[in-house]
Amino acid sequence: MTHSITTASEHDHSAIAAYGFWIYLMSDLVMFSALFATYAVLGGNFAGGPGPKELFDLPYVLIETIALLVSSLAFGMTMVAVHNGRQGAAKLGLLVTFALGLFFIILELNEFHHLIAAGHGPERSGFLSAFFALVGTHGLHVFCGLIWLVVMFLQIQMKGFNSHVIGRLTLLSLFWHFLDLVWIGVFSVVYLTGVLS
C-alpha cells in the first residue's frame, strides 16, 4: 500500500514538473517571437552603416548551424541509449552534445567579438541592436543548456537511470531540440535572408 502511494506521488510530481516545463517552454516561445518581430521591424534600419551582406559570413554561420543540428542528433541518440538502459552510450551522447554545443557558443562569441571590434556593436544601429538581442538570447539559452547537460551527466554518474533522471533528461531533450528549431529560424530569417536578399 505504501509503495503504491509513493509511486502515485512520484507520478504526480513528474506530471507537475512536465506541465511546468511546458509552460516555461511556451513563455520562451513568446519571448523569441517578440525578438523575431523586433528584428523584422528594425532589421532594415542600418543608420548609414553596414547591413547583413557586408557583415555576415554565410559559410561560417553554416558551420555553426551544422554543429548545433548534429548536437541535436547526438542528443536524440542519447535518448535512444537511455530508453535501452545503456548508461555508457548515454553519457557519451551527452559529451558529444556538450562538445558540439560548446563549439557553437565559441563560434558565436568569436563572431560577436569581431563585429564589436570592427565598430559594429549593438549601439551602432537598430539592425545590430535587434541582431545582438535575438542571437545573443539564443546563445544564452544554449549556454544554460550546456550547464544542464553537465548536471545530467553527473546525475547519471551518481544515480543511474532512475525515474527522476530519465524525466529530467526528457525535458532537457525537449529544451535542446527547441533551441535547434529557434536557430533554424534565426539562420533563415537573419543570416540567409539578409545575405541573399
Image: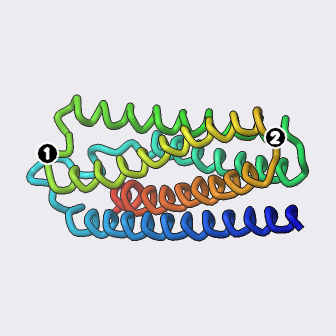
Q: Mark 2 belongs to which amino acid?
A: Gly
Numbered label attached to residue 65: none
In the rendering, at what x and y percent does residue 162 appear? 81, 49
Which residue: 67% across, 53% down?
168
For disc 1, the marked residue is: 124
**Vertically, is 52 above or below 104?**
below
Q: Which label sits in the foreground, 1 or 2?
A: 2
**Vertically, is 106 above or below 143?**
above
Question: Label 2 neighbourhood size at 10 Å, few (<14), some (14-19), many (20+)?
Answer: some
Which residue: 46% across, 39% down?
60
For disc 2, the marked residue is: 160
Which residue: 68% across, 63% down?
14
How many angstroms separate mark 1 from mark 2 (CA)?
50 Å
Which residue: 62% across, 41% down?
149
Q: Is 197 or 21 nearer to us in this picture?
A: 21
**Vertically, is 20 above or below 88?**
below
Q: Quadrant of the N terminus?
A: bottom right
In the rendering, at what x and y percent does residue 170 appear? 70, 57
Q: Secondary structure at mark 1?
A: loop
Left or right relative to 42: residue 67: right
In the rendering, at what x and y percent does residue 163 appear? 78, 54
Q: Mark 1 belongs to which amino acid?
A: Arg
Left or right relative to 1: residue 163: left
Question: Label 1 neighbourhood size at 10 Å, few (<14), some (14-19), many (20+)?
Answer: some
